[in-house]
Image (cartoon, rainbow, N blue to C red):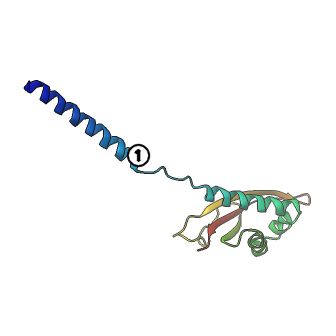
Amino acid sequence: MNKGYVYTLEVLIALSLILVTIFLAMKTPPTKPESEISLIKRTGFETLDFLTTRNRLREWVDADNESVIEGELLALLPKNVLAEVQLCTSPCDDSNVPRNQTVIGVDYYVAGYKDKYIGKEVKVWLWRKF
C-alpha cells in the first residue's frame, strides 16, 4: 500500500512541475516587431525618390546643396521625424547624428546630372522627435 502512495505523490509532483513550466512559458507575451523603424526608412527612401522624379535632387546634389535637400525632406516627412543629410563620395561623417536615439540610415546614390558624372551618395539619417 505504501508504494501506491509514493507513486501517486511522484505523479502529482511531475504534473505540478509540468504545469508550472507551461505557466511560466506562457506568462511572457511575444514581443511586437519594430515596424515603425521600417516605415520611417521606407518613407525616407520614397521621399528621396519623389525628389528625383521631380528632377530636383540631382540638381541639388550637383550644387552640393545639403541644406536645401534637408529642408525639402523635412517639409515632406512626417512632423515627428527629424533628418540629417550629407552628400559624400567616401564614408559619410555622422557627427551631427544623435547618439542617444534609434537612428535609421538611408543611402541614395546619384550618378550624374545633365551629362555630367557626379558619383555621390546622399546619406540621410532619420530619427523620431519626442
Residue 34 position within the rendered picture, expressed as x and y whole percent measured from the top left: 57, 55
Residue placed under numbered mark 1 in the picture:
26
**Amino acid found under the numbered disc labelled 1:** Met
Q: Is residue 91 visible?
A: no
Q: Residue at x 59, y 64 (%)?
A: 103
Q: Residues within 10 Å of mark 1 (few under 14, many from 20)?
A: few
- Residue 3's place in the image compared with 113, above or below, is above
Give the quarter of the figure containing the C terminus. Answer: bottom right
Relative to the observer, which residue lies in front, 25 or 107? 25
Q: Residue at x 51, y 70 (%)?
A: 100
Residue 71 position within the rendered picture, expressed as x and y whole percent measured from the top left: 76, 75
Residue 27 position within the rendered picture, expressed as x and y whole percent measured from the top left: 39, 50
Q: Is residue 81 visible?
A: yes
Residue 110 position within the rendered picture, expressed as x and y whole percent measured from the top left: 79, 58
- Residue 3's place in the image compared with 80, above or below, is above
Quick check: 130 left or right of 25?
Answer: right
Relative to the observer, which residue lies in front, 40 or 96? 40
Relative to the observer, which residue lies in front, 76 or 94? 76
Q: Quadrant of residue 40?
A: bottom right
- Of all residues, the one furthest to the front in this rendering is 1
Relative to the observer, which residue lies in front, 122 or 81? 81
